Image: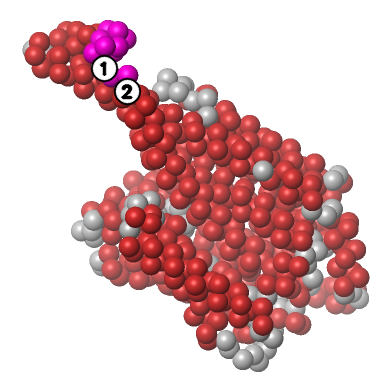
């Protein structure tokens, strides 16, 4: 690159700020609404199941547009697409806040998801093109902060906004951020020569297949546990539609001259292995982010705010560790950082598996901090190794695929955790109930002690005897639930350790750079 052309390039840190602001806004909106559901339901006179569709609709629409991002960027130009996405996301945020009933809110959330889904892959591609390969670690540190910190701070921020203002402001707060983002993008972002828009034949059949397939898959993952998975006819239909649509889409794309999603990127086996590793990691991360608050609120009696306060220090640890790793990663073997991050994350879930019904706040807090540090150490080098062998011309397509699998991994992690907690609780309850028999001396002793406690509180003897049995059964249910969470945390620990062999098989950054240079 000549000195003159280099001088025309906008400052990389200004570019980073420009793309990070709207991306963080989009990622935040995946979780910030969750804690406002009760307020939304009451305000719009909707049932809880109807209210949760406002989350499901956003996630499904988000997932649909992500894999198309690279293709749409080539079709209309990346800057134009980025500006359109930010502007429409801002407009749809206003419409969500102004929604007059639950149906209108769900519709506007679909629009919000369709326009916001493009921003993470677009931001990642722009960051990787703005920073030289030697600074990919720092670029991915910035991306990782937005991707991982948003879901952690979202529930805490959403709860605060809802309590201090109203749920409408969970959406309205996006408007000034969106306006500033559009202005910055107009003056800062430029398109490379190969991404200024080109004439292409639009594959409408392929577009329909990926939209239907990914949308049905996301709906299946989000609603499956509520509908008892494949015991429900509707879940069977969603699963079949997703399987058939995505299978046909893959067959069509492999034969297309200008595919919507260029699957040839998976010929780079480091990219393939990295995507599998990130998929498992995100399943672990989101599984933990969902299961830990449920454990704290249902078994430990924590409020939503206190449960969020447990998650927040892990987000701070993640926020602090990522820039440090991004700065020093290129001096050492990235695989060493990844393995250390895997072990730290696995150790954190192993500690969570040791929780019991008498655990204190500090004991719960430290594993979350370890996980935040592990995430920061792992995320940047893994992302850098995954995309290091991809040409800049293919980066938009590669980041779209990467972000799609990252999102689906998170959805599968949530579905896996919620299903396993429910089923393992039933398993442990069946085993523990076997001991609730008059022939068990411990059972007799505890039921008598519970009855005595109730009598001391003024309950009549007959009611106290029955109440003592009720207290004992309630304790059994809580213990069964506690065991189910321990089982899930052990599973998540094993899941993280599976990533290590995949990482060892990936090529180092220097090797992949050599391949790209040779290919160019």
Image x and y of residue 53, in percent: 34, 61
Quarter location, residue 51: bottom left
Q: Which residue is mark 2?
A: 434
Q: Does 448 sit left or right of 501 as displayed?
A: left
Give the SS element for disc 2: loop
Give whichever of 19, 398 is nearer the camera.
398
* Quarter of the image that includes the C terminus: bottom right
Give whichever of 1, 402 is nearer the camera.
402
Q: Which residues are magenta?
A: 435-446
Q: What separation in Å lies between label 2 and label 1 (alpha carbons)? A: 7 Å
On whether residue 393 falls in the magenta region, the answer is no
Q: Which residue is mark 1?
A: 437
Taking the spot 53% from the left edge, 86% from the top edge, the residue there is 204
Give whichever of 185, 67 is nearer the camera.
67
**As displayed, is residue 142 above or below residue 195?**
above
Q: Does 32 sit left or right of 251 as displayed?
A: left
Image x and y of residue 417, in percent: 47, 44
Taking the spot 88% from the left edge, 66% from the top edge, the residue there is 515
Q: Are marks 2 and 1 in contact (CB under 8 Å)?
A: yes
Give the SS element for disc 1: loop
Give whichever of 443, 120 is nearer the camera.
443
Image x and y of residue 342, in percent: 68, 40
Taking the spot 61% from the left edge, 49% from the top edge, the residue there is 280
Taking the spot 42% from the left edge, 20% from the top edge, the residue there is 358
């Amino acid at each position: 690159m000549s000195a003159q052309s280099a001088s025309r390039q906008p400052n990389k840190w200004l570019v980073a700020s420009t793309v990070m602001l709207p991306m963080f806004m989009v990622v935040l909106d995946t979780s910030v609404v969750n804690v406002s559901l009760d307020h939304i339901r009451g305000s719009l006179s909707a049932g809880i199941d109807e209210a949760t569709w406002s989350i499901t609709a956003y996630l499904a629409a988000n997932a649909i547009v992500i894999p198309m991002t690279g293709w749409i960027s080539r079709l209309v130009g990346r800057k134009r697409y980025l500006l359109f996405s930010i502007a429409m996301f801002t407009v749809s945020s206003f419409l969500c806040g102004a929604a007059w009933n639950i149906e209108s809110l769900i519709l506007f959330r679909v629009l919000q998801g369709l326009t916001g889904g493009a921003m993470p892959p677009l931001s990642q591609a722009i960051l990787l093109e703005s920073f030289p390969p030697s600074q990919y670690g720092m670029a991915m540190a910035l991306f990782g902060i937005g991707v991982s910190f948003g879901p952690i701070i979202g529930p805490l921020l959403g709860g605060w906004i809802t309590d201090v203002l109203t749920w409408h402001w969970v959406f309205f707060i996006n408007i000034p951020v969106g306006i500033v983002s559009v202005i910055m993008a107009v003056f800062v972002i430029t398109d490379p020569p190969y991404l200024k828009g080109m004439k292409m034949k639009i594959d409408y059949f392929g577009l329909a297949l990926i939209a239907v397939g990914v949308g049905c898959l996301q709906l299946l993952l989000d609603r499956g546990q509520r509908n008892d998975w494949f015991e429900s006819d509707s879940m069977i239909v969603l699963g079949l539609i997703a399987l058939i649509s995505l299978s046909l889409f893959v067959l069509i794309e492999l034969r297309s001259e200008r595919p919507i999603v260029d699957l040839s990127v998976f010929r780079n086996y480091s990219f393939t292995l990295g995507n599998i590793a990130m998929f498992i990691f995100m399943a672990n991360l989101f599984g933990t982010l969902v299961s830990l608050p449920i454990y704290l609120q249902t078994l430990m009696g924590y409020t939503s705010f206190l449960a969020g306060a447990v998650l927040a220090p892990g987000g701070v640890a993640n926020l602090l560790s990522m820039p440090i790793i991004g700065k020093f990663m290129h001096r050492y073997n990235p695989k060493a950082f990844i393995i250390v991050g895997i072990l730290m994350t696995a150790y954190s879930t192993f500690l969570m598996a040791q929780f019991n019904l008498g655990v204190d706040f500090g004991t719960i807090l430290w594993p979350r901090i370890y996980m935040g540090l592990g995430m920061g150490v792992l995320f940047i080098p893994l992302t850098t190794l995954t995309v290091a062998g991809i040409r800049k011309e293919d980066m938009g397509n590669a980041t779209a695929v990467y972000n799609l699998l990252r999102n689906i991994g998170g959805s599968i992690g949530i579905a896996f955790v919620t299903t396993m907690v429910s089923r393992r609780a039933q398993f442990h309850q069946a085993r523990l109930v076997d001991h609730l028999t008059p022939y068990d001396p411990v059972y007799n002793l505890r039921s008598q002690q519970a009855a005595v406690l109730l009598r001391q509180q003024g309950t009549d003897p007959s009611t106290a005897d029955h109440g003592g049995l009720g207290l004992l059964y309630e304790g059994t249910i809580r213990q069964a639930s506690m065991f189910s969470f321990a089982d899930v945390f052990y599973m998540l620990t094993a899941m993280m350790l599976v990533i290590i062999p995949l990482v060892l098989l990936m090529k180092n950054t220097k090797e992949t750079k050599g391949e790209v240079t040779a290919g160019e």
